[in-house]
Amino acid sequence: MNEDKPSIVVIIAAGMGSRLTTEDSLPKPLMQVNGRALILRVLDRFYEAGVTEAVIVTGHRADEIESGVSDAQPQTRVRFVRNPNYKMSNGLSVLAAKSAVGNRNFFLSMADHIFESSLISGLKDAPLPDDGLVLAVDRKLDAIYDEDDATKVKTADGKIVEIHKELTEFDAVDTGLFLCTPALFDRISEAAGARDNGDCSLSDGVKAMSLSGTAIVHDIGNGKWQDVDTPGAIDHAARLF
C-alpha cells in the first residue's frame, strides 16, 4: 500500500454544464448554493481537511471561472491549467493536470459536487493501493437524489468491478471524490491513445485500474454529498447543506 498522504487536489471545472440552465448567467462552477459558489465550497472543504494546494482544470468559460475563483481569494493555493479539449470526455481534463501534479499522490474532485469535509478526511485515511486509486462511494441507494444520472458502481470485496452511468446491477454510487496515485494519468493516457479520436473518460481510466485490482472503494457511511447538475439539484443541495 502507498503511505504518502496527499496535500493537493485536482478539481475538474472544464465542462459545458449544459444540464444546469437557470436565469443566472454565471458558468456552472460559479453558481451558488446558499450564497457560496460551488467551486469555492469544494475548495473550502478541502482546506478544512488540510489540503492546501489545488489544481483547477478549466475549459468552457475558463476566463470567467479563473477570475471568479481568484477574486474570491480562497485560502487554498490555486493553480489553473486549461484543457483545450473540454468538449470531449472528462478524462482529458484529468490528464491536463498531469504536469502540475507530477509524481505526487492527489485527491480528485468535480467542481459541481459538494460534500462535508469529513468525506475527505475519511478518504485520506483509506489504504491506497500501489499504482491505484480509492473512490469514495455512497451505499445509501435509497437516499440518492436523481439516481438515473448518477454514476453507478458495482463492487466485490471492496474493489471496483464495473463503473458506468448505465449499469443496471450496482451496489454503490460514485460521489465524484477520489484519492489517486499518478498511475491514473498513465491509464487514461493509454486508453485515449487506443482510440482514433483520442477521447477518454475518467471512468475509462478507473476501469483500466479495476482490471488489475488496484481500484478500490471507500464507503462514506452517513456522510453527505450532492452532485449539483440540474436546477432541482441546486434546491436539494440548499436543503441538504
Image (cartoon, helix red, strand yellow):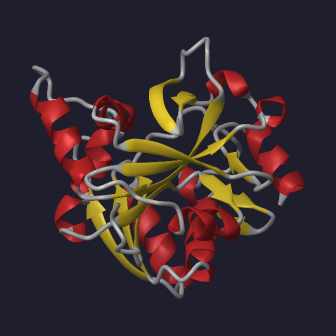
Where is residue 47 shown, x and y percent of the image?
56, 81
Where is residue 206 shown, x and y percent of the image?
36, 37
Query: Residue drawn 63% across and 72% down?
Result: 45
Q: Residue furthest right?
A: 239
Q: Quadrant of the N terminus?
A: bottom left
Where is residue 211 shown, x and y percent of the image?
30, 29
- What is the tally of numbered marks visible in this picture? 0
Please determine whether, in this image, residue 172 is positioned above or below residue 137. Answer: above
- Residue nearest the viewer, comparing 16 with 164: 164
Answer left or right for 76 relative to 96.
Answer: right
Query: Residue drawn 53% across and 39% down?
Result: 158
Residue 50 appears in the rendering = yes
Please determine whether, in this image, residue 219 is positioned above or below residue 51. Answer: above
Please determine whether, in this image, residue 97 is positioned above or below residue 139. Answer: below
Residue 86 appears in the rendering = no
Answer left or right for 38 relative to 103.
Answer: right
